[in-house]
Image: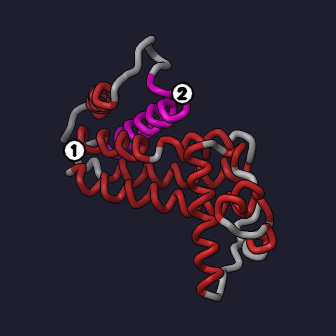
Amino acid sequence: MTDAVRPPLQARSRDAWERVLAVGLDLLRTEGYDAFTMGEICRRAGVSAPSIYARVDGRSGLFLAVYDRGMRAVAATEDRALEASGGTIEGVARAMAAVFSEHRDLLRSVIVRAAAEPALLDRGAELSRGVVERFASRLEHVDPERAAMLVRTLYTECSFRAMYGSEFWRPTAETDDEFVERLTTLARLLAGPVH
């Protein structure tokens, strides 16, 4: 996988590149990686394959460009959710659930692809460690080791739900509110004594 993007210089080329990235992101969200083909992206974005190859090295390079765009959107949601969390255990649990809820389809697609792409798995692991560190650092009144463990657990629960849906652990779907309540209860238990 190479993530070198050769940026477009002309306004028309920049517009076309933006369409390509938007279409690619939409395909990952709605149909998954298997639908993420150069032909389909070209068709939906109204561009030629050579115009994409002028920017990136094939499907893999395009995927990384779209992935980076998507992860910037996820990071922006994280920033907003953390800001609103108030640094409380409940607020941080809600923030984590909100991020995964808003970006569930993209994250599912990326997680599935990472299982088959070691470079993407490494990149995702690095980003994930950063997320855990950022969220854990907001828990000011929780022991730092416990905070990291707590947030890793929340992250795992949210990842699992994104991958397998809300009906995995029980025969009827768990609502978003029920999920947040379960995450909050789990977070309180893992936090231990708050100082």
Identified at 59% across, 67% down, the residue is 19
Residue 184 spot, x, y in % from top left: 28, 31
**Dot 1 surroundings within 10 Å: few (below 14), some, or many (20 or more)?**
some
Disc 1 to disc 2, C-alpha distance: 28 Å
| Vertical comparison of 118 with 10: above or below | above
Q: Quadrant of the N terminus?
A: bottom right
Magenta stretch holds residue 159: yes
Q: Quadrant of residue 56?
A: bottom right
What residue range appears in magenta?
Answer: 143-166
Task: Report the amino acid beneath label 2.
Answer: Tyr
Residue 32 spot, x, y in % from top left: 64, 43
Q: Is residue 170 left or right of residue 93?
A: right
Badge 2 is on which residue?
A: 164
**Dot 2 surroundings within 10 Å: few (below 14), some, or many (20 or more)?**
few
Say what secondary structure mark 1 lies in. loop
Q: Quadrant of residue 66?
A: bottom right
Residue 121 spot, x, y in % from top left: 66, 47
Name the colour scheme. Answer: secondary structure
* Label whose residue precedes the other's in the sequence (1 or 2): 1
| Vertical comparison of 176 with 173: above or below | below
Please tell me the numbered disc located at residue 88: 1
Q: Are marks 1 and 2 in contact (CB under 8 Å)?
A: no
Identified at 55% across, 33% down, the residue is 163
From the image, give the main secondary structure of the stretch colored magenta: helix
Identified at 56% across, 53% down, the residue is 26
Identified at 34% across, 26% down, the residue is 175
